[in-house]
Image: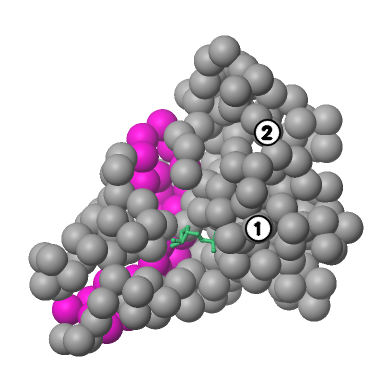
Amino acid sequence: VKIGVLISGGGTNLQCIIDKVKNGYINGEISLVLSNKKDAYGLVRAKREGIDAIWMDRKKYSTEEEYNDAIIEEFKNRDIELVVLAGYLKVLSKKFVTEYKGRIINIHPSLIPSFCGSGYYGERVHREVLKYGVKFSGATVHFVDEGTDTGPIILQRIVQVKDDDTVESLKERVLKVEHEILPEAVKYFCDGKILLDGRKVIIMR
Ligand code: GRF
């Protein structure tokens, strides 16, 4: 399965996918890594592995629609079959979601439907978790639909929230389970083991 990965930052989730492709856990190949941020370290990680890595400069496009069309173009040219959003901080256009419906996977650093939706990304998620005082948090891998963080849930894994947690310590603990469930979901997709029954995702393990 040809995989296209969209990133905006450090790319630690991307790195896990790269490693799991290399060791054969994921039956796929990363055909393109595309970032909306020029300085995303994830681009360095991709180039180091000889993977096509592109910074798509938003300033070169007049609208979000055109920006997304340019990304679709890059993906179509490479016959991408699975789109993975690995710390990608932009919303996809309706056309993009329609074009790749059922083939876009996103990782979110909370237990959806809690602490998610527009504005809930990165540290903001963990800050709200600590403020609210929930005893567990975690990560969610889900299909992307027209909403924000609203698509069918593929995998979730929980972490304990500790009394002395800071945003940093909680973020680290959640990032660790992100690095476990994202490659796992990509593997199941590449192995054709993910069934969608309405909103319910069944994994044929
Ligand atoms: C992290 O905050 C992670 O929770 C979210 O995107 C951010 C960047 O992750 N998914 P990465 O290190 O760029 O993969």
In what element is the residue under mark 2? loop
Is 148 magenta? The answer is: yes
Q: Is residue 105 visible?
A: no
Residue plotted at (36% across, 52% down): 121
Residue 187: percent from the left, percent from the top? 66, 66
Q: Which quarter of the rendered picture does the C terminus lie within? A: bottom right
Relative depth, front residue between 59 and 129: 59
Residue 51: percent from the left, percent from the top? 83, 54
Measured in 3D between alpha carbons, the distance from the residue under mark 2 to the one under mark 1, in whole angstroms, is 14 Å
How many numbered callouts? 2
Left/right placement of residue 31 relative to residue 154 reads right
Q: Which residue is mark 2?
A: 56
Relative depth, front residue between 103 and 49: 49
Residue range of the region highlighted in magenta in the rendering: 135-161
Q: Of the numbered discs in the image, which one, if any, rests on residue 41?
A: 1
103 w.r.t. 203: above or below: above
